[in-house]
Image (cartoon, rainbow, N blue to C red):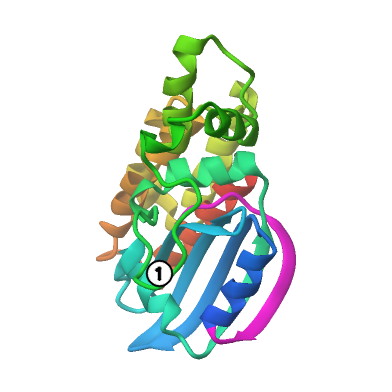
Amino acid sequence: MLIPKGQTLELGRRGAFREIIRELSETEFSGYVEVSYKKEELTKGKVLFSGGKIVAAGIQRVISKKEILGSDALKELLSLESCVADIYALDEKNIAKALEWNKKAVVEELPEGEKEMEDGLTEDVITTPDERERILKKYGIKMPTDEEIDQIIINALEGGYDVVSTTAGDFESLKKALISTAELYLGKLSRKVINVINDCKSSEELVERFPEIKSAAKSLVVFVPRKKIDDMLSEMERIVGESI
């Protein structure tokens, strides 16, 4: 999962995952938790919260690189009796970004016995005027005309609300940083990765096509050690998270 860099609240908390998230839910936490644990193999995960509700989750096996997203990932995390968690705060703007970037990781249905998400992800939540007003306020949307309200809320909840405001200059700096990282790790073999980066015309497009960057990099595994490629991609994710 690709998430904007948040404000560090706590590092290295240990315990059962369910107990950790119970406290975060009770305090209406907004942000994300990075989790490390060993189940089958060393695994890392991220869980995104909004107002104390879990809205997205994903895990990845460190060795096999197998990725599990959404409700299936959350189900495994809730079973953990022991894990290490780092906790970071995010504002609503960056939470909306994270949801846009990680649509496949959205938790559409919580495991049986867990509290339901506050807002859900369907247009059913906009059936009353009070609910409309609350959601508009939550996403910082100025009051539009009556005809526009429903569509704006639906777009916001589905991740379509435009919250990214990176300028063209920022985007060029971001591209240069990613290209420099590719050249540092891959040398002359970086051209395939750089071509994808250069083909992007905005920060939004770069985020959407990040899987292509990953694919281009991993296709070089015959020539470049896998660890080196993984380290490069981790660094790129960090750069994107901090820059956008």
Residue 10: name its quadrant: bottom right
8 versus 19 height, above or below: above
Which residue: 58% across, 72% down?
21
Q: Which image quarter holds the N terminus?
A: bottom left
Q: Is residue 143 above or below residue 209?
A: above
Residue 60 falls in which quadrant of the image?
bottom left
Quick check: is 110 in the magenta stretch? no
Residue drawn 59% across and 22% down? 168
The reply to whether residue 62 is visible in this rendering is no
Q: Is residue 128 visible?
A: yes
Q: Nearer the viewer, residue 7 or 172?
A: 7
Image quadrant in which the C terminus is located: top right
Label 1 element class: helix
Residue 204, image x, y percentages:
47, 32
Q: How many marks?
A: 1
Is residue 9 found inside the magenta-colored segment of the image?
Answer: yes
Name the residue at 56% across, 69% down: 34
Which residue in the protein does label 1 denote? Answer: 74
- The reply, left or right, for residue 173 in relation to residue 102 is right
Kindly indicate the quadrant of the structure image that contains residue 191: top left
**In this view of the protein, which residue sits in the foreground, 237 or 151?**
151
Residue ID at (29%, 71%): 66
Look at label 1 and name its amino acid. Leu
Identify the magenta region: 1-16
